[in-house]
C-alpha cells in the first residue's frame, strides 16, 4: 500500500488529470504501477520522468539519494510489465534498466536538466538506475468519461507540456546552446501533436462530417489549421535540430506554436465538444 503522502498525490493526480500542487506543482510526474516482487499485488507510486522520444519515457530510481533502491525498482526487475498513468492516458509499458553508456548518457541528460540528480548520486554509493518505460502498442486509453471530455483532456495535456517546455527553456540559462533534454522534450511534443492531428484527420473529423453535413465549414477550417500547425511544428523541429540553436531562439518558436495552437484548440473545443457530448 502507498504511504499517506503518496496516496494524497495519487488522488490529486487522478482527480486533475496529472496536475498536482504542493512540492510537485509544475513538475513532470507520472503514476507508475508495478507488481510486487513478493506479494504479486499492484503498487502505485508517483515518480518524476523525462520524455525520451515518442512512446518512451525515463524514470530515475534515486530514492532521494538513499542507500537502497526504491521498492518500485525491485518490483519492475521482477515484473517488467508496468502500468503508466500520464494524466491524460493510461497505458501498459515494458520497463528496461539502462546500462553502461546508455545509462550514463541518460543520467547526464537528467543532470543537465536538474542538477539535483547529481546531488542525489553524490549522497549514495550505489549507481542510481535509469529506467526506460516503453509503451506497449495498443489503442489509447484516455482518462475521460465521455468523448467530449476526452478531447479536452488531451488538449490540456498538450497545453501543459508546452507550458513546461517554455518554463524549462526560460529557466535553463542556455543562451549559448540548448540542453540535450530540452531538445528531446521539444521533439517529443512535436511528434505527439503530429500523431494527434493525424488521428483526428483520419478518424474523428470524417466521422463528424458524415453525421453532421452542416459542419463542413468548421471541418474545413480545422483542417487548414492542422496544416498551419504542421508547418510550425516543422519550423520548431528545424530549429531544435540545429546544433547552434540557443534557448531564446527555440523559445520564440515554441511561443509561436503555442499561440496558434491555443486558438485552434479553443475553436475545436467550442465547435466539437457540444456535438460529442450530445
Image (cartoon, rainbow, N blue to C red):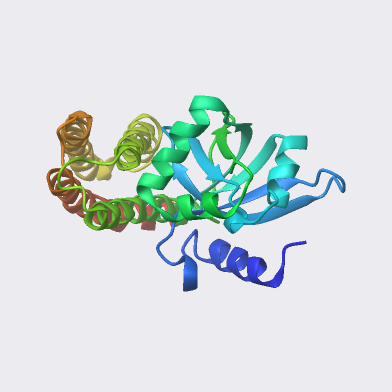
Closest to the observer: 119 or 9? Answer: 119
Q: Is residue 228 left or right of residue 151?
A: left
Residue drawn 30% across and 54% down? 168
Rendered position, 105 above or below 75: above
* Rendered location of residue 62, percent (x, y): 58, 51
Judged from this view, the residue extending furthest toward the right is: 39
Q: Nearer the viewer, residue 10 or 104?
A: 104
Residue 94 image offset from top left, x and y in percent: 63, 32
Number of on-image labels: 0
Residue 83 lies, in percent from the top left, at: 65, 43
For the C terminus, give its image quadrant: bottom left
The residue depicted at 19 percent of the width and 36 percent of the height is 236
Residue located at (64% from left, 44% from top): 126
Q: Is residue 192 above or below residue 275?
A: above
Residue 190 found in image quarter: top left
In the image, 164 versus 213, the foreground residue is 164
Q: Quadrant of the N terminus?
A: bottom right
Q: Can the viewer see residue 54 in this picture?
A: yes
Residue 143 seen in this snapshot: no
Relative image position of residue 82 (x, y in whole percent): 67, 40
Return the residue nearer the eye: 196 or 67. 67
Q: Of all residues shown, which one is farthest toward the top?
A: 101
Identify the residue at horizontal 32%, vertical 37% (top origin): 180
Q: Is residue 213 left or right of residue 236?
A: right
Q: Is residue 57 left or right of residue 138?
A: left
Amino acid at each position: 500500500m502507498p504511504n499517506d503522502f503518496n496516496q494524497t498525490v495519487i488522488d490529486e493526480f487522478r482527480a486533475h488529470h496529472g496536475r498536482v500542487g504542493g512540492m510537485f506543482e509544475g513538475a513532470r510526474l507520472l503514476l507508475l504501477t508495478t507488481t510486487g516482487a513478493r506479494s504479486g499485488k499492484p503498487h502505485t507510486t508517483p515518480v518524476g520522468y523525462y520524455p525520451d522520444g515518442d512512446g518512451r519515457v525515463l524514470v530515475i530510481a534515486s530514492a532521494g539519494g538513499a542507500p537502497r533502491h526504491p521498492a518500485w525498482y525491485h518490483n519492475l526487475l521482477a515484473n517488467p510489465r508496468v502500468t503508466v498513468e500520464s494524466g491524460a492516458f493510461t497505458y501498459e509499458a515494458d520497463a528496461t534498466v539502462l546500462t553502461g553508456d546508455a545509462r550514463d548518457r541518460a543520467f547526464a541528460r537528467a543532470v543537465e536538466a536538474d542538477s539535483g540528480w547529481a546531488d542525489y548520486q553524490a549522497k549514495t554509493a550505489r549507481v542510481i538506475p535509469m529506467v526506460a518505460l516503453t509503451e506497449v502498442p495498443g489503442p489509447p486509453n484516455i482518462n475521460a468519461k465521455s468523448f467530449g471530455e476526452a478531447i479536452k483532456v488531451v488538449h490540456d495535456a498538450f497545453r501543459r507540456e508546452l507550458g513546461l517546455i517554455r518554463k524549462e527553456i526560460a529557466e535553463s540559462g542556455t543562451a549559448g546552446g540548448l540542453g540535450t533534454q530540452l531538445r528531446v522534450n521539444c521533439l517529443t511534443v512535436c511528434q505527439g501533436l503530429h500523431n494527434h492531428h493525424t488521428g483526428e484527420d483520419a478518424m474523428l473529423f470524417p466521422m463528424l462530417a458524415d453525421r453532421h453535413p452542416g459542419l463542413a465549414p468548421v471541418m474545413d477550417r480545422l483542417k487548414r489549421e492542422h496544416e498551419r500547425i504542421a508547418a510550425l511544428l516543422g519550423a520548431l523541429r528545424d530549429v531544435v535540430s540545429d546544433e547552434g540553436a540557443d534557448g531564446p531562439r527555440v523559445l520564440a518558436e515554441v511561443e509561436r506554436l503555442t499561440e496558434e495552437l491555443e486558438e485552434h484548440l479553443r475553436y475545436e473545443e467550442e465547435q466539437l465538444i457540444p456535438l460529442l457530448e450530445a
